[in-house]
Amino acid sequence: MTRRALLLIVVALVAWGCASAATPPAPPPAAPVVTGPPAPDVFESPDFIVVIPKTPETSATLAARYLGDAAKAWMIEEFTGAGTFAPGQQAVIPRKAWNPAGVTASGYRLVPILVYHNLDAQPKGRLVQSVSSFDQQMHYLKTEGYHTLTLTEFLEFTRLERQLPRKSVVLTFDDGYKSFKQYAYPVLKELGFTATLFVYTDYVGAGRNALSWADIKALQGEGFDIQAHSKTHGDLRRAPGETPAQFAQRMQAELAQPRDLFKRQLGQTPETIAYPYGRWDADVLKQVQAAGYVAAFTVRRQGNPAFVSPLTIHRSQIYADMSLDEFVKNLTLYQEEDLR
């Protein structure tokens, strides 16, 4: 190749390189646009969260997002009076209790506590309720939006430490019948309900109709509360002719023995007791308090305000011959009274 030809090739390569350098590089591809619902406007204070949604919301979705628990939807519903919120509709979410006592100028909130005893396929007398009747009553509570409480939650309400949903109820079962495990347990678990069992210790494991300690421990593991109902289920009041010393000795057995036995069998000491037959007097109250119980339950047919006396809390017995309408009459949630 001649020198002239070589120079022509070099000149051509330089010209091509210059032309390439003058051409700007192609821009990078644009990032994909992510679409989705617009974020709501949110304003916060220590006590409230105010949300103005851009898309439809429910109390449950708001509670899940801002309170960490969809089950707290009732707080939004009761504060705002609404369960759904359209775009642009302000939703106020309380962060904490705003009226734990449930007292207003026109009255105060009540919590009904219901008492059941035995269940069977067919009713027998007043205290053995049919399974179908019990099932109907529990489904009524579920359909109507009732929340079942643990005793801990209820007692926190009486100490003004917890605000409760307006439709709150406590379910209790006395004595310790095996039918609770056979009939009540499946219905309660299906509906997501809780309950408290008051058992008297002489009956535990006493026969085929009684729960055993193993049964009770298993129910405790399932989240059911187990509390005391005395040792023998005898009337705790001082009997005619019973001396003060005899009365004190009997109370030691009736009240202290269950606490010791619960501790050994269940790993817990009961803090509450249901009076056998609902019977009590001033002397019994002193003995119950001295034994270490913080609350006790009667069978007076009445709901409970936050200021109920802790050693005489009311419960309503549910009888086998009650119709659904009669059952509903035990669910009084508010006492109207001019408190201005």
Image: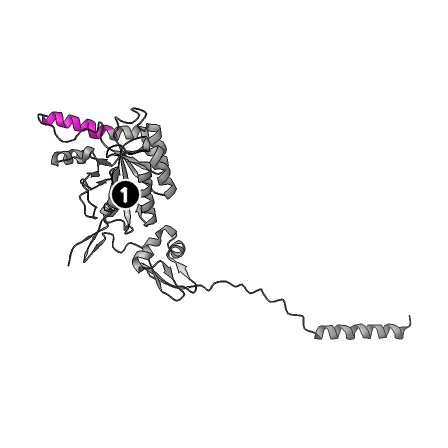
Check disc 1 and report the residue beneath it: 170
Can you say whether 201 is above or below 40 in the image?
above
Whether 252 is among the magenta residues is yes
Please state if 101 lies on the left or on the right of 221 as rendered. Answer: left
* Total count of labels: 1
Q: Position of residue 200 (x, y in %)?
A: 25, 30
Q: Position of residue 29 (x, y in %)?
A: 62, 66
How crowded is the residue under tag 1: few (<14 C-alpha within 10 Å), some, or many (20+)? Answer: many
Whether 262 is among the magenta residues is no
* In-front residue for pair 287/63: 63
Let me know if residue 20 appears in the view. Answer: yes
Residue at the location (30% across, 24% down)?
207
Quadrant where the N terminus sits is: bottom right
Q: Position of residue 182 (x, y in %)?
A: 35, 33
Residue at the location (77% across, 73% down)?
16
* In-front residue for pair 4/88: 88
Quadrant where the C terminus sits is: bottom left
Q: Position of residue 296 (x, y in %)?
A: 20, 38
* In-front residue for pair 273/126: 126
Q: Start and end of the magenta stretch? A: 235-257
Say what amino acid the circle numbered 1 marks.
Val
Can you say whether 183 is above or below 191 in the image?
above
Please state if 64 lies on the left or on the right of 81 as rendered. Answer: right
